[in-house]
Amino acid sequence: MTSHNLSIVLVSAAAALRLAAADSSHAKYFDHYEGTKTCLVCHEEDAKNFFASQHYQWKGPAPNIANANGKMLGKINTVNDFCTNPMANWIGKVTNSRGETISNGCSTCHAGLGKVPGDKATAEQLENIDCLICHASGYRRDLYEDASGKPVWKPILWKNPVGMDSVAKRISQPTKVMCLRCHSASGGGANYKRGDLEYKLAACERDFDVHMGTDGGKMECVTCHRGEAHRVRGQGADLSGTDTVGRLTCNSAQCHKDAPHKQPVLNRHTSRVNCTVCHIPAFAREEPTDMDRDWSRSMYDKDADKYTAFITLKQNVRPVYVWWNGATKEALLGEPVPRLADGSVGVMIPLGSRGDSKSKVYAMKLHTARLPLLDGKNFLIPIVVEQFFRNGAIDPAVGAAAEDFYHVKDAKFSWTATSRYMGIFHGVQPASKALSCLDCHSPGGRMDWKALGYKADPLDTASRASLR
């Protein structure tokens, strides 16, 4: 199912929520919507700000990547273990043997109309921004050809001026529905990539997420993530570039502060244990998530008439727990890969340790994969996955990417195991469903104490007995 189809599923959720910001009618500001240039009449400065943001450029300053060395980094110029790199798969209809569209490229979730982000905020680039994808409830788009035959994103109502005007005047702040149609659909399927961004968040109960629940905080994504000048707040353990400096934290003055519990022993934990450890006991609770993606093996989906990597999906997954001080080491394109103790390549490895006072224990998703490695260089190679989807032939898809990225023809490569740690931050459950002391502090409990730098469980046997 494409992200376009998945977003349709969310329409009923949007209607049910009657989201608070959805009453900002623009009917008095223009008569007819003529594309982004209509928005630019009033919002050119906003467009310039958005042009420079992560959501448009897909790269930015990377102060939290320990080996960035001042480079501007982001999904557009790094390699990942899901669809590998968007520049190898930007835009274009990929059809199966039945003539059905099976992919439209990575720009499906880019807030632009099809052009690759440029370095300068030219008129052409500003008019490429798709304001409605984030600000118009009910807006949908699909891939069409322009006058020159190039694929472009257009509203599905582009031949229906009355309907188009109605949607274009229905302007609001971004809603959960708008955010989730890309952030949940990324990676090839609902909740495949992040694991903690399920479509249920659009209209869930407090027991599923205390912040977003309709009977809980009733919060929108932008409640926490909204920044100034189209800069989105927040920094995960596996994000290269960032729009803002500093992480979102639970203990900020307007949220839970440093001592949110009545019990002093729990408040002592918050100095070294992130709130998510106890309050997100599991992720992918409704929609399974991709835990391993082996690009060296293909799967054929007969119903979709499409090939994919061999993907292992899991549901109700227990996080892994690691120290993180806010910095991450990344395997970058064109650089020899870093190896972990288990021999895998560390695509995204959070830095920190018990002895580092800036570190806390965080709940993470550990995603594993197999990716191609350029012989003689030890560089990770992206994959032209759109080519692979059609016929399942992996060697040409790797070879094409090796030539595009490294200018190597007839590249020789091998396959390597990879590891990526991804922070788990959504799906926060109420105190009644949080972990108890003995979930971690008991034989066979959740924590790998030695991996965390302890000789054994720091809570001794006598102390554990008093908790029973």
Image (tube, helix red, strand yellow):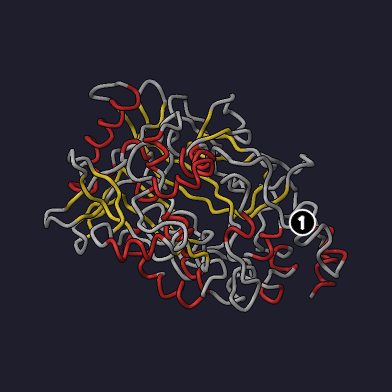
Image coords of residue 82 (percent x, y): 40, 47
Callout 1 amino acid: Asn
How many dots with numbers?
A: 1
Residue located 54% across and 42% down the image? 239
Closest to the observer: 37 or 282? Answer: 37
228 on left or right of 91:
right
- Image quarter of residue 192: bottom left
Residue located 49% across and 70% down the image? 200
Image coords of residue 371 (percent x, y): 37, 39
Residue 281 makes an appearance in the image = no
Image coords of residue 222 (percent x, y): 59, 58
285 on left or right of 429:
left
101 on left or right of 185:
left
- Image quarter of residue 32: bottom left
Q: What is the secondary structure assignment of the residue under circle 1?
A: loop
Residue located 12% across and 54% down the image? 97
Image coords of residue 461 (percent x, y): 81, 64
| The C terminus: image quadrant | bottom right
Which residue carries the number 1 mark?
Answer: 251
Q: Residue furthest left?
A: 98
Q: Is residue 426 above or below residue 148?
A: below
